[in-house]
Amino acid sequence: GITLPLVILITARPPLAGNSVLSGLISISPVTFLHPEYRSIINLQELVREKSDKTEQFITSFTNMYRYMLDAGRLRQTTLEDELIFLEHYSYLVHVRYPEVEISVDYEKGMLKEGYTFPMTIQTLVKNAIKHNAHSRTNILKIQVDIKGHNIIVTNNLIPMSSPEESTGVGLENLKES
């Protein structure tokens, strides 16, 4: 399949406090996440009904992710380390709902504490890849997150949808502006 790269710049220090574009991104981030939260609660209900061994890990990932989202509304930036911990929890929830989605991360260890990005940046790109690609047990969606130098690069195999989902484009537009 085709691989589509998306590149986000990593800064070595926090952005300026008065950045209005960043403020706009932060103010809408929780709104853009409401649907996955709702889906997560439904998935949790299913796990409880099945008495699944995954229930405890699901609750832990969900609460850690939710805590990060609440904090992100107050933050102007986050370390790559915190962003990747958030992505790990998000990836677990995605895998419970979509076992056919594989998310891999590769990074230079030194960048985790030195690099900064906007909160929920990587998750937005991963969510976008999931939303706009057909995936099934026979069509595995592979998403790769690479952090190299001062770039976050998210790629995925392209699996065209037979009837593409309507999109407002808000998530990627906010990332472009930042």
Image: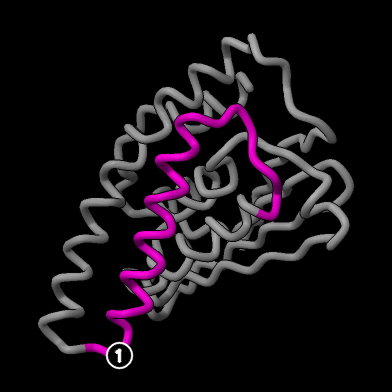
Find residue 134 and report its horizontal and vertical position in percent. 39, 60
Q: Residues within 10 Å of mark 1 (few under 14, many from 20)?
A: few
Q: Nearer the viewer, residue 161 or 91?
A: 91
Q: Quadrant of the N terminus?
A: bottom right
User: Which residue is rendered at x = 83% and y = 46% of the image?
Assistant: 114
Vertical placement of residue 59 versus 74, above or below: below
- Image-quadrant location for residue 17: top right
Vertical placement of residue 75 versus 68, above or below: above
Vertical placement of residue 83 versus 98, above or below: above
Vertical placement of residue 50 versus 101, above or below: below
Q: Is 44 on the left or on the right of 88, as rendered?
A: left
Find residue 127 and report its horizontal and vertical position in percent. 45, 50
**Tag 1: amino acid:** Asp
User: Which residue is rendered at x = 17% and y = 63% of the image?
Assistant: 42
Find residue 86 and report its horizontal and vertical position in percent. 53, 56
Q: Is residue 59 magenta?
A: yes
Give the secondary structure at mark 1. loop
Looking at the picture, the colour scheme in use is one colour
Find residue 90 and report its horizontal and vertical position in percent. 45, 60
Disc 1 designates what residue? 53
Q: Nearer the viewer, residue 127 or 24?
A: 24
Q: Nearer the viewer, residue 58 or 94?
A: 58
Residue range in magenta is 52-81
Q: Quadrant of the C terminus?
A: top right
Q: Is 59 on the left or on the right of 126, as rendered?
A: left
Name the chief secondary structure element in magenta. Answer: helix
Q: Is 34 on the left or on the right of 146, as rendered?
A: left
